[in-house]
Image (cartoon, rainbow, N blue to C red):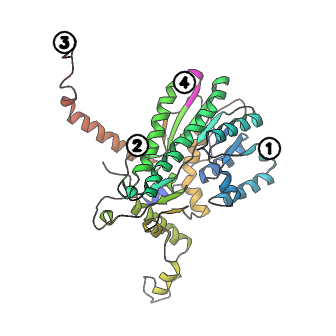
């Protein structure tokens, strides 16, 4: 099985057409679990402009201490204050999805403010980078595995459980879970991240059958790996020499993401223009100015957490396809159970399904070799 490959085209997708919202009779109420993420901010702008209501969950500690992405969210709030038609349609609530009590309180506040929740977007996510052995090096790296599931799985599960009673009571609602094609494809060096996404997808697939009788829809949206990873916090554990690129040929996520982050650094801080006759390679002085790159932090001998330093233009282009998909799907009467964003993701998943189908055919005789047929006695 070939892991998804990083490509410049996937990092800078072409801007799609203007949002196409599904028809509806009244403004809808969106609840977004992590309102400070770039996808959430871009989506909130679109749906507020459309006339819908938005409840944005914000991690209280991060917002109060001006940490992480809170500054970008504060800039968004200033835009909301200056836009009269948005002002009364946005509510910000404190939300740490890992706390059941906070989830219940946030949903209750949303219902008190706007009467209901029509669309729940679960987009709480972060990526832990490291091979299985690298994550087993110490008690701290081992604890990161649990933290990965607390954030990517349980935080989203807790909000879903909090919103279901209201949706079931009004017999209407749409739950959207934002994961990635990493929930379809195993990726070396992102084993725990992929596992947490596979877990939430298995949960949502099962949940879909349970809530369908109450007219509650369930959709899973899968963007490319770079979209969700680069727009959220990345935590990297110290690398083991046995998995270095010169020893292990597997295309590990650490190297893929490091390369992308280095390109982002170069685009944010390009080398000075070369004078006529000057060598094309940068001088040692230039290297001193621009080193170390952000990508180098993923190979640090210490556990390192960071938010990729994306420029606003790069960020907007990166999330555009995903936001377009969410506006087209959210609140739809007949939404897809699973939607893959981007042609590259579709191609990767098709290749995976083709491999599964071919392997199934290769061993089909083994699968049916001991079938108990009608009329035969079972040996027990």
Neighbor class of circle 1 (other Cα within 10 Å; few <14, some 14-19, many 20+) is few
Q: Is residue 113 magenta?
A: no
Residue named by callout 3:
377
Q: Residue furthest bottom?
A: 277
Q: How far apart are marks 2 and 4 (CA)?
A: 24 Å
**Kind of element beneath mark 4:** helix
Q: Is label 3 or label 2 in front?
A: 3
Q: Residue furthest front?
A: 139
Sequence-wise first label, 3 or 1:
1
Q: Can I make out residue 356 in this image?
A: yes
Q: Is residue 214 magenta?
A: yes
Residue named by callout 2:
184
Left/right placement of residue 201 relative to residue 123 reads left
For image coordinates 77% across by 46% down, the residue present is 86
Circles 3 and 2 in contact, beta carbons < 8 Å: no
Q: Distance between the residues labelled 3 and 1?
A: 70 Å
Sequence-wise first label, 3 or 2:
2
Sequence-wise first label, 2 or 1:
1
Circles 2 and 1 in contact, beta carbons < 8 Å: no
Residue range highlighted in magenta:
213-217
**Kind of element beneath mark 2:** loop
Q: In this view, does 351 lie above or below 22?
A: below
Left/right placement of residue 187 relative to residue 44 reads left
Sequence-wise first label, 2 or 4:
2
Question: Which mark is drawn over residue 212?
Answer: 4
**Kind of element beneath mark 3:** loop
């Amino acid at each position: 099985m070939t892991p998804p490959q990083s490509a410049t085209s996937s990092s800078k997708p072409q801007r799609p057409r203007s949002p196409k919202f599904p028809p509806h009779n009244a403004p809808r109420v969106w609840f977004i679990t992590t309102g400070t993420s770039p996808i959430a901010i871009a989506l909130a702008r679109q749906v507020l402009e459309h006339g819908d209501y938005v409840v944005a969950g914000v991690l209280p500690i991060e917002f109060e201490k001006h940490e992480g992405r809170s500054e970008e969210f504060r800039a968004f709030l200033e835009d909301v204050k200056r836009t009269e038609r948005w002002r009364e349609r946005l509510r910000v609530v404190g939300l740490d999805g890992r706390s059941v009590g906070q989830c219940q309180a946030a949903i209750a506040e949303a219902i008190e403010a706007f009467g209901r929740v029509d669309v729940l977007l679960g987009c709480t996510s972060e990526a832990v980078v490291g091979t299985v052995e690298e994550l087993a090096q110490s008690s701290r790296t081992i604890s990161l595995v649990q933290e990965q599931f607390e954030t990517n799985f349980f935080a989203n599960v807790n909000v879903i459980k909090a919103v279901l009673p209201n949706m079931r009571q009004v017999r209407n609602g749409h739950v959207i879970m934002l994961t990635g094609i990493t929930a379809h494809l195993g990726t070396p060096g992102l084993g725990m991240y992929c596992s947490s996404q596979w877990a939430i997808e298995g949960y949502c697939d099962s949940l879909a059958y349970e809530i369908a009788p109450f007219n509650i829809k369930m959709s899973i949206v899968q963007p490319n790996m770079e979209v969700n990873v680069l727009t959220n916090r990345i935590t990297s554990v110290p690398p083991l020499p046995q998995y270095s690129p010169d020893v292990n040929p597997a295309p590990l996520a650490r190297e893929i993401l490091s390369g992308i982050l280095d390109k982002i650094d170069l685009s944010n801080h390009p080398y000075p223009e070369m004078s006529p006759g000057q060598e094309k390679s940068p001088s040692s002085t230039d290297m001193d100015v621009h080193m170390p790159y952000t990508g180098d932090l993923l190979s640090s001998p210490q556990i390192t957490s960071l938010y990729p330093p994306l420029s606003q233009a790069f960020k907007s282009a990166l999330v555009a396809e995903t936001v377009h998909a969410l506006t087209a799907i959210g609140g739809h009467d007949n939404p897809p159970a699973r939607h893959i964003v981007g042609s590259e993701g579709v191609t990767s998943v098709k290749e995976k399904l083709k491999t599964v189908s071919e392997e199934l055919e290769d061993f089909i005789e083994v699968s049916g070799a001991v079938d108990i047929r009608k009329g035969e006695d079972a040996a027990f």
